[in-house]
């Protein structure tokens, strides 16, 4: 029996999952072991919602984790800016068009939206890419 709507819970948002795993440190302490075990969980979920793909292509299953402030602080210094205190910034991955002109327009749109929200863009970082083990569907 599904409970009635209450607080932040709304039964209209109920749906099935084909595989979910949770790992936590009950004391809230970050640990690389938790990340390694989360990756192990993903590797053990055989279906994960992806059917009909080549054997190397997944469905985008991932993990939610705390922001690694020390790592981002190091990267920020390399890029020439200081990082605000933990919990006072956000980071995201953006996939731009391979077309350089279109990518520049996309980047500008994001910068404009950040400014319109009253926020400050700290910087951009090109992420290292290693696609040697991607399947055909993912590379495409």
Image (spheres, rainbow, N blue to C red):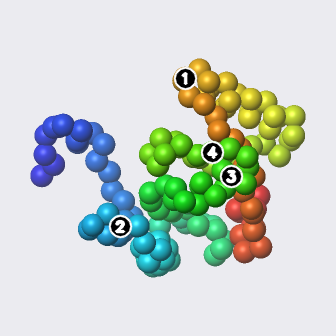
Q: Position of residue 55 (x, y in %)?
A: 64, 75
Report, in whole angstroms, how far the alpha carbon at label 1 lies from the one at label 3: 24 Å
Q: Residue at x 63, y 45 (%)?
A: 82
First of labels 2, 3 by sequence position = 2
First of labels 4, 2 by sequence position = 2
What secondary structure is found at the residue carrying circle 1? loop
Residue under circle 1?
Answer: 118
First of labels 1, 3 by sequence position = 3
What secondary structure is found at the residue carrying circle 2? loop
Q: Residues within 10 Å of mark 4 (few under 14, many from 20)?
A: some
In-front residue for pair 2/95: 95
Q: Position of residue 140 (x, y in %)?
A: 77, 58
In-front residue for pair 4/109: 109
What secondary structure is found at the residue carrying circle 3? helix
Q: Position of residue 57 (x, y in %)?
A: 64, 68
Is 136 left or right of 28, judged from the image as shown?
A: right
Residue under circle 3?
Answer: 77
Q: Which mark is residue 2?
A: none
Residue under circle 2?
Answer: 29
Q: Residues within 10 Å of mark 3 (few under 14, many from 20)?
A: few
Q: Quadrant of residue 9?
A: top left
First of labels 4, 1 by sequence position = 4
Label 1 vs label 3, nearer the camera:
3
First of labels 4, 3 by sequence position = 3
Residue under circle 4?
Answer: 82
Report, in whole angstroms, how far the alpha carbon at label 4 lies from the one at label 3: 6 Å
Q: Are marks 4 and 3 in contact (CB under 8 Å)?
A: yes
Q: Residue at x 46, y 49 (%)?
A: 86
Q: Position of residue 83 (x, y in %)?
A: 58, 46
Q: Is residue 126 above or below residue 11?
A: below
């Amino acid at each position: 029996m599904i409970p009635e709507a209450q607080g932040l819970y709304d039964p209209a948002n109920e749906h099935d999952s084909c595989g979910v795993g949770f790992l936590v440190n009950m004391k809230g302490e970050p640990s690389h072991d938790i990340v390694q075990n989360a990756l192990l969980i993903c590797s053990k979920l055989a279906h994960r919602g992806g059917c009909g793909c080549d054997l190397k292509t997944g469905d985008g299953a991932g993990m939610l984790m705390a922001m690694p402030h020390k790592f981002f602080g190091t990267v920020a210094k390399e890029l020439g800016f200081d990082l605000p205190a933990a919990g006072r910034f956000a980071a995201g991955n953006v996939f731009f068009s391979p077309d350089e002109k279109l990518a520049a327009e996309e980047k500008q749109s994001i910068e404009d939206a950040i400014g319109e929200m009253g926020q400050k863009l700290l910087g951009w970082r090109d992420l290292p890419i290693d696609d040697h083990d991607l399947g055909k569907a993912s590379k495409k």
